[in-house]
Image (spheres, helix red, strand yellow):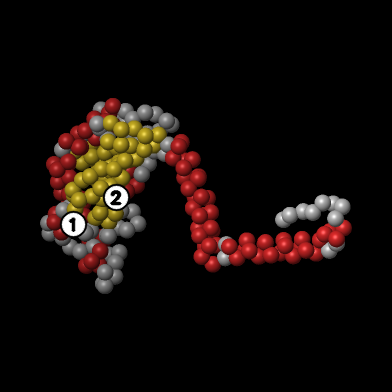
């Protein structure tokens, strides 16, 4: 808006009305600019900023570590990375969680536990498969009693071999347990299970041998 000198009475006569009209026109143009597609883009950008800035701030507070044992780990309250494993005939790339408490560093026992698993993946995976199969086989009728006729043979079928477990369990996470006992190298394997969709299945491997099989709860502490 261009202003005339204060002494120009002819210009200023009715200027208040003209200014109001100018403001209304400018406001309308501004509104039109952000209407329709333009407004959608602006709103989308604003939403992106609102989400991205807190995310960026959180990332700046995170810690990273890269090493020969676990590969790259990210700390955001808990150490997490990725782990590849073939189990029950399927290749999985699942979250790897290294459990620590109260800001404690990853212990040497945990490193040894993962090295032991990483260097014996095939043998330990086969051991887990056999253990899960036997665990399910001993409880299959109990599981079948939880389903109706239409789904029982899909979610809790009778099985005869380890290969029959394919599709019934799915590995979701591998957890290197906190080393409360330096002589116990513990890794947990957390599965979803069609025959127990609420509690799933957890397998605890200690020093290369299966120590426990039960609901996921045994590993979620």
Residue at x 85%, y 55% (from the top left corner): 8
80 with respect to 69 (left or right):
right
> Which of these two is toward me, 164 or 74?
74
Give SS at disc 1: helix
Residue at x 17%, y 45% (from the top left corner): 125
Report the residue marked by disc 1. Answer: 165
Give SS at disc 2: strand
Check the picture and name the quadrant holding the N terminus: bottom right
Quarter of the image where one finds residue 176: top left
Whole-percent x and y of residue 154?
23, 66
> Which of these two is toward me, 156 or 106?
106
Quarter of the image where one finds residue 17: bottom right
Whole-percent x and y of residue 166?
18, 57
Report the residue marked by disc 2. Answer: 172
Residue 200 appears in view: yes
Characterize the local packing of mark 1: few (<14), some (14-19) or many (20 or more) Cα atoms within 10 angstroms.
Answer: many
43 with respect to 22 (left or right):
left
Check the picture and name the quadrant holding the C terminus: top left
């Amino acid at each position: 808006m261009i202003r005339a000198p204060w002494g120009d009475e002819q210009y200023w006569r009715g200027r208040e009305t003209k200014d109001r009209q100018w403001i209304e026109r400018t406001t309308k143009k501004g509104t039109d600019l952000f209407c329709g597609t333009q407004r959608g883009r602006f709103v989308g950008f604003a939403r992106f900023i609102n989400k991205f800035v807190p995310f960026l701030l959180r990332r700046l507070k995170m810690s990273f570590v890269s090493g020969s044992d676990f590969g790259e780990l990210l700390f955001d309250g808990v150490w997490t990375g990725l782990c590849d494993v073939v189990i029950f005939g399927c290749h999985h790339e699942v979250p790897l969680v290294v459990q620590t408490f109260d800001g404690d560093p990853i212990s040497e026992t945990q490193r040894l536990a993962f090295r032991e698993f990483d260097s014996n993946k095939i043998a330990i995976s086969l051991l887990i498969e056999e253990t899960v199969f036997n665990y399910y086989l001993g409880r299959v009728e109990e599981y079948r009693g939880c389903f109706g006729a239409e789904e029982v043979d899909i979610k809790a079928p009778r099985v005869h071999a380890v290969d029959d477990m394919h599709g019934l369990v799915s590995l979701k996470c591998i957890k290197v347990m906190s080393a409360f006992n330096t002589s116990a190298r513990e890794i947990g394997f957390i599965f979803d299970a069609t025959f127990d969709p609420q509690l799933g299945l957890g397998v605890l491997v200690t020093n290369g041998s299966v120590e426990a099989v039960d609901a996921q709860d045994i590993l979620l502490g």
